[in-house]
Amino acid sequence: ADLLRNRSAVAAAVVLLLVVVVCMCAPLYAEHIAHTDPFRSHVSGTTVVDGKTVPVLTPSSTGLGLGVTPIGPTWDMGHYFLGADNQGRDVMARLLYGGRTSLFIGVTAAVLTVVVGGAVGVVAGYAGGVVDAVVSRVLDVIWAFPVYLLAICLSVVLLTDGLSLGPVTVEAGSLWLPVVIIAAIYVPYIARPLRGQVMVLRNKEFIQAAIGSGAPTLRVLRREVLPNVLPTAIVFVPLMTALAMLTESALSFLSVGVQPPDASWGTIIEDGLGLLYTRPAVTIAPGLLIALTTAALNVLGDGVRDALDPSARLRGGV
């Protein structure tokens, strides 16, 4: 109820839902509206603009006469609404497919980060002693590396052979590879605050009473500790989703994130880099969607925090 009364959070949720729904309709748009395959080159293709058949890429007057300048935005939903990229692919269709990929990686990486980071933080904070010392030092090592540098290094190494951890194998070109990399580098961002919260909770009277009554550790964690840290973990999900999407876009822009034939908003920005001065829509459109989506996620995250912890809002207003 508190969340629904927060107009900013509700507006952010509506914007986010709209982005998700539109991106989920990517196959319908490509097949039934644009009538194009956004993953195939169309260097010699044609389209219809104002009733006239025009080439998707304007042929060069020299050399082999290949297309060099892609068609610009036609503002016609059925014919290259946002124009084409340097391979003649429909930018609008690729934008929707790229949104599906970016949202999948962002949400999945965020959930994985919160689950793993939360488990690590709870165990370290509750166990204390040697366990806490070892876990804290490992988190410090990960924390010491600049986030994007660590992500780039892991991506470059794993893009060649993929990742193999016992029975779990992630192929080099799989979308799960950036998910795992992003989740791994952000685990300390979740584990450290939750560890501190659990350490405070462990000294509370109700926790000490449960321990003193002889309750098993797992029961104490499940019934006493987890319900108190769960709201904090939930607040982290939209915020980490925004952070994961930004990280994925940066990696894909550097060609060490999402790999062809898949597309994300980051790869589309990279595709349009050479067209920045002639066809800026190729780069500006995904950039605007990244900014809009991450802003909505941050506003929604703030609203969820205020709803689950009203005291945080009061502290912020002092």
Image (cartoon, rainbow, N blue to C red):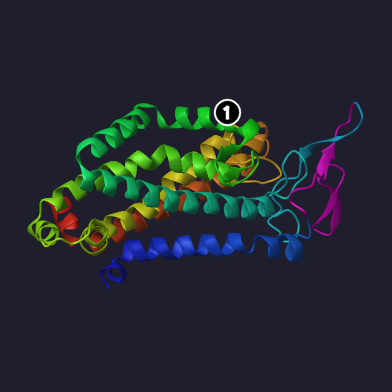
Relative to 92, is 287 above or below? above
Which corner quadrant of the image does residue 187 belong to?
top left
Q: Mark 1 belongs to which amino acid?
A: Val
Q: Nearer the viewer, residue 163 or 5?
A: 163
Looking at the rendering, the stretch of residues picked out in magenta corresponds to 37-62
The picture places residue 297, in percent across and down from the top left corner, at 40, 54
Q: Residue furthest front?
A: 214
Q: In percent of the image, x 35 and y 46: which residue is there?
A: 117
Is residue 308 placed above or below 196 in the rendered structure? below
Q: How many marks?
A: 1
Q: Position of residue 191 (x, y in %)?
A: 31, 44
Question: Which residue is painted at 47% across and 41% down in the image?
Answer: 182
Q: x%, y% of residue 172? A: 64, 38
Front-lying residue, 234 or 280? 234
164 or 92: nearer the viewer: 164
Label 1 SS: helix
Residue highlighted by disc 1: 157
Horizontal arrangement in the rendering, residue 20 relative to residue 222 (left or right):
right
In which quadrant will I find the N terminus? bottom left
Q: Label 1 crowding class (10 Å Cα cut-off): few <14, some 14-19, many 20+?
A: few
